[in-house]
Image (cartoon, rainbow, N blue to C red):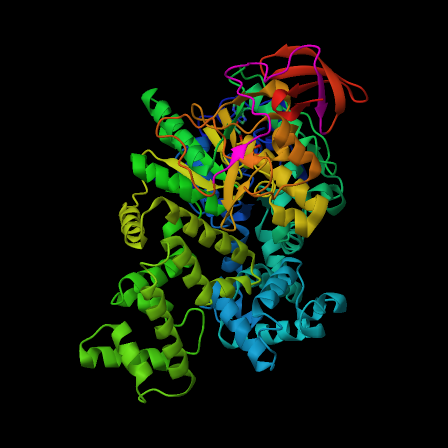
Amino acid sequence: MSHSFDDALSEAAAPAPGEPPYLKGLNPEQRDAVLSADGPVLVLAGAGTGKTRVLTTRLGHLLYSRRAYPGQILAVTFTNKAAREMKERIGLLIGGVVEGMQWLGTFHSIGARMLRRHAELAGLKSNFTILDADDQLRLIKQVVTAANLDEKRHPPRQLAALIDRWKNRGWLPADVPNGEAYGYAAGKGAQLYAAYQQRLQELNAADFGDLLLGTIKVLRENPDVLEDYRRRFVYILVDEYQDTNTAQHQWLKLLAAPRHNICCVGDDDQSIYGWRGAEVDNILSFERDYPGAKIIRLERNYRSTPEILNAASGLIRENKSRHGKTLRTDAESGSPVTVLSVWDAEEEARQVADELEAMMKRGERLASAAILVRASHQMREFEERFVAVGLPYRVIGGPRFYERQEIRDALAYLRVVYQPDDDLAFERIVNKPKRGIGDKAVQDIQITARKMGVSLSQAARRLADSDEMSGKARTQLKLLMDNFDRWRANIAAMSHIDLATAILEESGYIEMWQADKSVEAEGRLENLKELIRSMDGFENLGGFLEHVSLVMEVEQNETGDKVSIMTLHGAKGLEFDTVFLPGWEEGLFPSQRSMDENGLAGLEEERRLAYVGITRGKKRVQISYAANRRTHGLWQSAIPSRFVSELPVAAIEIKEGGSGSFQQRGAFAENRWSTGDFSSSYDSPGWRRAQTNAQSGGVRQRGPVIEVTAQVINSADDSHGGFSVGDTVVHAKFGQGRVVHADGNKLTVRFQTAGEKKVVAAFLQHA
Ligand code: ATP
Ligand code: MG
């Protein structure tokens, strides 16, 4: 049943004796936030306290109480999916489907809508093209070339990243301070930015940053247009306000004046987009932006069990730069957050798949569970396992592993080596990385192939050996074809893993991404390493490629009961009964890159991400870490994330991995922790293969043989983790102390300087 807005109003307004039904069930603070319609309101509250619910109800209330028509409300959500959900919920709240919420959407979608309406004022036509990241980069390259700059010394991606940053800050070319412009080609940055904008205009195109920045410019330069919008938007609502950047903040301020009927909701502890220009200060300075603002705090969490909440609160308390807040729940006590240690990522995936199967047996829906990873390359291991056992899954917010651009490219190389006549694969990589085999040369190859009735590879070989093609294209093509011959000749002699590594390196493909300064490049390199790693389980190249083609064929059916796999960043605002948080290892999570680039601020953003992850769970959360992870082509002994040790002992339960698999616990883990030795490989002293690998069909041995000579505590044998009351122990953070109480893995230790603490056996060492 679809209603027009007026239908909805008349229907809703008629049978309303007393209080509207949507207010029922709200707590007093939530109700206050919904009913304080006029003036600036900020709801600053922790996860799961009903901020989004308040925002939705408020929107419904504004409509129901006839304060505004749907077209008079500007409502900003974080994703398009959230916008759709909000529309549906409002429909439910006030009856029927409300139409005409044309200003409900993401910053980008609303910005695009506005810019199209006033395109001519921004020097564009209303049908302008919105460039994606690839097109944007191509254009920036042209600009760099046109300025006679050396692309090697001044990578265009670097300029692209800078321009993004400037746009996030709301800077037009003229606004870029000199110091900033120095970040690229000795001060030419701002000039090139101007040239790029000029090119965009000539092409009748805008990039994502322009959708907002362009609109801001139009609003500033055209008071009548601004006035029109200010009159139109009687109310403004914004979700996830902590992740707005400066441009978005300026845009909101422009539109909200002078009425200031703006309601923003957010949580400074969930600010996770600093790396993309989000300014958590926007939320903390709300009162300064909107004097007289009403600040409402919600403290009751409706989402999670007390255990989940305690774990999350305890963790986030470690952040120094935050405004502390209280969170409580009236929910019944549930199971503790489990912390599971496993041997490697394969065991991690197997264990999660087993849990999911057990859930299904209990009659729970797969869709009520999610796996939230820090880095997208972690997804592959899960995908493989789920495909192997036939467990339906969906990857949210990104292509599945084998569908990613860099993976497809790498596979194309392998396919051409294995099957020279694979034309599709050949076409895909013949000039990737760019090696001077341009469109014309590719066309020549195609024509030759057609004429001779042979494959592209054969035609290319022919052209490279003849004089029909000349110049750089011919030299390069010959080089490439010689490479392919050489790689092919090595199929039998080399292991398929070494061969694949050599191909990706010698072809220049890896180098291409290494030179790439974009945000995604690092992730792509990780994915490529993950691809190589995944070849380990196969006998040869043919077996591997066969497997991949089968995995890729698993049809992607979007409906049905499926477990979700997504990144932590993508999970913001969502909730699931069961949440799996794999890969809690130093370097992976917190990400080494964030810490290297942003120091303490980077670490704290990672911790907020961990907080977001835990607080997605309603009933069960399982955190896991592997003792070994293969990164950079090497097996690394991983150590548990510091975040694991920051979880309050009372809220968690330490669990073993698969039966008999090696447990990384106790002394040596702590040793490495305290010495900061996070990167020791299998070759380090103290690491040889764990002899506890008694599992039938258990952990496959991969990489060099290792053995753990440090004390391995199997808590199945000794439930106190090898410690008894009276033992003298050492803890990396608290120093030396004596065990005064032991309850399973949880010990109470009286430390000499730190006093009495509850700690987990895994973090202790005998003195
Ligand atoms: P996040 O910070 O993760 O975005 P949030 O503060 O936006 O969380 P919501 O998603 O709005 O929280 O609410 C969390 C859960 O609690 C939802 O399932 C919501 O329906 C429920 N909830 C919120 N308020 C109430 C209430 N007063 N009574 C019952 N359930 C509620
Ligand atoms: Mg929310």
Task: Identify the residue at image location x=29%, y=77%.
Answer: 461
Q: State yes or no: residue 728 in magenta.
A: yes
Pick the residue in front: 110 or 271. Answer: 271
Residue 11 horizontal/vertical position (percent): 41, 32
Q: Residue at x 21, y 78 (%)?
A: 450
Q: Examine the residues drawn in magenta and state their main secondary structure.
A: loop
Using the image, determine if residue 592 lies above or below residue 714: below
The count of marks equals 0
Instruction: State the quadrant of the C terminus.
Output: top right
- In this view of the protein, can residue 46 be seen by the observer? no
* Placement of 487 over or under 454, stated as above or below: above
- Magenta run includes residue 662: no
Q: Tell me the quadrant of the picture where the N terminus can be found.
A: top left
Can you see residue 417? yes
Closer to the camera, 524 or 25?
Answer: 524
Question: Could you say which is closer to the camera, residue 81 or residue 87?
Answer: 81
**In screen coordinates, is 461 left or right of 105?**
left
Q: Is residue 191 above or below residue 752?
A: below
Q: Position of residue 665 (x, y in %)?
A: 58, 27
| Residue 631 horizontal side relative to residue 255, left or right | left
* Magenta region: 705-732
How far across and down, in percent of the image, does residue 165 sit?
Answer: 64, 60
Q: Residue furthest left?
A: 453
Residue plotted at (50% across, 31% down): 690
Q: Quadrant of residue 371?
A: top left
x, y (%) of residue 196? 58, 73
